[in-house]
Amino acid sequence: MKTKKKKKLSPGRIIALGFLSVILVGAILLNLPAAHSGRVEVTPIDALFSAASAVCVTGLVTVDTGAAYSGFGQAVIAVLIQIGGLGITTLGAGLIALLGGRLNQRENNLVKEALNMPTWQGIKPLVTAVMVLDFSIEAVGALLSFFTFIRDYPVGRAVWLAVFHSIAAFNNGGFDVLGTGDSLGAYIRDPYFNLVTAALILLGGLGFFVIRELLFHKKGKPFTLHTKVVLAMTAVLTVGGTLLFKITEGRGISWLGAFFSSVTARTAGFATFPMSGFTNAGILLMCILMFIGANPGSTGGGMKTTTVFVLLCSLRSAATGEEAAAFGKKLKDDTLHRAFVIVALGLLWGLGMTAILCALEPALALRDVLFEAVSALGTTGLSTGVTPLLSTPARLCIILTMYVGRLGPLTVATLLVRKKIAAVSRAEEEIPIG
């Protein structure tokens, strides 16, 4: 008798199932009475929503985290954010590496897939560096944040707020446990705290590859194309976003507020100014920044800055007839194709989910629904205040969108399709376009 070979799950499917498993475990823990403060009712769908938002490092909430959850519940959310930011495979492999263990080939392949690396060579030192960098930056961030919270809270409470805030900010989580219901609105006029938070968000959004290259860059050796593109796009989007927010919101926002809004829109989810007070132009600008998101290999989401950069290079190439290139390097055709596919899939999902939410919530304004859908897809976590008003079906749609945003639209699409290599190539035929 012939024995049937067991089909092995692909690394992508294992990662997707891993995130789903962590979400479900988190939801179970957050549904326990010990996780609730008793001041605000937390339903099972609220617990599931909070767990999904934390693991997908989004920050959208149906109940205020600081008011609804106890210290245990808040600790669970902090751990979920940490797992979601690093990635379950990277975190697991990093702990094995730090403890002196060895990674087998399957574990190396999982980390390679999670970090979008071209090869699994050098995985162990990489994940070790990722873990050390992550915890070191979070420790410094907590220390710097402590000096702000100690002014308003007892020492023990200030320490916990600082630790939680540093984890949420560096991992672009967007959660807060202040219990005020207006995110970081209490610190709207605190330049020090705004700049510390913005620095944590930007560092988390840069990506571990870029941070490592900046820290250990050898003099005279040129930066990689990836690092050049990331630094250029981060600077352009941050400065450009600041100027445009100041223009669209006018006297309604300070220069500090415009800068913080520009930074937090790139998947962080914190807010010093209420989103409901933004003009339509400001909301549209915020949606664009949320859709673009952070950088590859980072704790942030979105379609990624490098994807948009490659897309723009491709558009310029199509318009001028020149080859698609950047910083003196030619871009691969496969990279150009992937950029178009990722942006197209992201737009299709975002617009499709907006249409579904409009049907489910006819009483809500289009701008609020669009903002909510893009925020979930970009794993940003900003909201105009409609999240708690959503019905259960709408909340489930947002949960699914956050999950898709965390994995990436292209990754999800490949998971749903079985790859088959055609035996022969089909005949070509022209079709008019444009």
Image (spheres, helix red, strand yellow):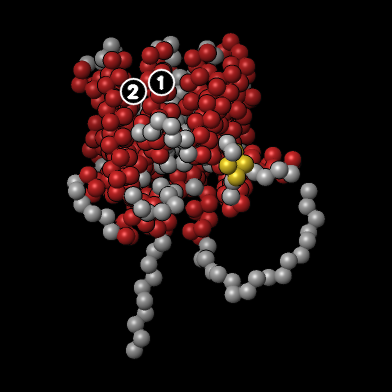
Identity, as a three-letter code, of the amino acid under mark 1: Leu
Crowding around mark 1 (Cα neighbors within 10 Å: few <14, some 14 to 19, many 20+) is many
Q: Is residue 93 above or below residue 139?
A: below
Q: Where does residue 96 sit, x and y in percent of width and height?
A: 23, 49
Q: Is residue 363 above or below residue 28?
A: above
Q: Which residue is mark 1?
A: 184
Q: Is residue 59 visible in this depiction of the protein?
A: no
Q: Where does residue 57 sit, x and y in percent of width and height?
A: 40, 38
Q: Which residue is mark 2?
A: 178
Q: Is residue 314 visible in this depiction of the protein?
A: yes
Tell me where residue 288 sits by quadrant.
Answer: top right
Q: Residue at x 33, y 26 (%)?
A: 165
What is the secondary structure assignment of the residue under circle 2? loop
Q: Residue at x 47, y 27 (%)?
A: 264
* Quarter containing the N terminus: bottom left
Tell me where residue 292 sits by quadrant.
Answer: top right
Query: In terms of depth relative to the viewer, which is nearer, 76 or 307?
Result: 307
Q: Are marks 2 and 1 in contact (CB under 8 Å)?
A: yes
